[in-house]
Amino acid sequence: MTNSQPADQPGTALSWAALFDMDGVLVDNTDFHINAWLQFSQHHGRPITKAQYVDNINGRVSADAMAYVFQRPIPPGELIVLTEEKEAIYRELYRKHLQPTTGLTTFLQELKARNIPMAVGTSAPMSNVTFTLDGLPLRPYFTAVVDASMVHRGKPDPEIYLLAAGRVGVAPNRCVVFEDAFAGIEAGLRAGMKVVALATTHTRAELADTGAALIIDNFAGLTAAAVENLLTPV
Ligand SMILES: O=P(O)(O)OC[C@H]1O[C@@H](O)[C@H](O)[C@@H](O)[C@@H]1O
């Protein structure tokens, strides 16, 4: 009996973790969020443009997004009502299109076979997490799920990813974050993690100077070894 198992064997506990953003990463749904925000903001007489969404709302918690739309801080009770109104529009638009991002399931299966801990760190409310993770279903892959209700400060603050790393028990410098949004990429980097950027919401050119260690279109062909190589060897 030996302890010196090769690190690339399936079933070996490698000393790193994969932390996934949800919207724009586990699902390629940005256009549906955009349409929901445009409808919602129009309905409230505070119309926003797609460019305003991309620059000020994408990947941010609802408290920050709503404060931007209404140009004032939103009290907690009102925030719950407005958030659910907007997210109900989104879920209605996206429900019949709900599917994992290309290549995701194969990649998650490989990580699981290798005992790589996985967590979700999302700015979304719990209602959307349930819709996505249980609707697909993807929840069994994740040891921990951190949503907007569990943090004080949303992305680009690193709190969501630091909490997710703590929940899987892996040091931040051994975590790789998968993100599509500028706010989320910044959150991962400020947490001291490596970031893989998905070019779902932004183009590769727009992501080039974000500090992401790797830019991918989706998960097709991505391997655990390629991601692990991004980390500084221990
Ligand atoms: O990308 P994440 O962190 O999963 O973010 C979820 C949020 O992303 C925003 O882009 C959406 O407009 C929100 O409505 C959504 O809740």
Image (tube, rainbow, N blue to C red):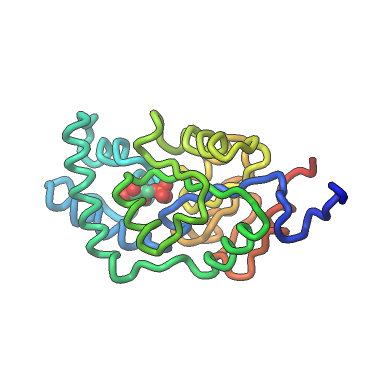
Nearer-the-camera pick, 207 or 80: 80
Place of residue 162 in the rendered image (x, y in percent of width and height, measured from the top left): 54, 34
Q: Residue furthest front?
A: 1
Residue at 55 percent of width and 41 percent of height? 188
Residue at 21 percent of width and 47 percent of height? 84
Q: Is residue 63 left or right of residue 42?
A: right
Place of residue 197 in the rendered image (x, y in percent of width and height, measured from the top left): 56, 54
Asked whether the viewer can see residue 184, the reply is yes
Q: How many marks?
A: 0
Quadrant containing the C terminus in the rendered view: top right
Dividing the picture into quadrants, the one containing residue 151 is: top left
Q: Is residue 94 left or right of residue 55?
A: left
Residue 86 sits above or below residue 216 on the image: above
Residue at 12 percent of width and 52 percent of height? 43
Residue at 57 percent of width and 61 percent of height? 108
Asked whether the viewer can see residue 52, the reply is no
Place of residue 130 in the rendered image (x, y in percent of width and height, measured from the top left): 34, 53
Place of residue 61 in the rendered image (x, y in percent of width and height, measured from the top left): 35, 40
Q: Is residue 161 left or right of residue 28?
A: right
Nearer-the-camera pick, 69 or 20: 20
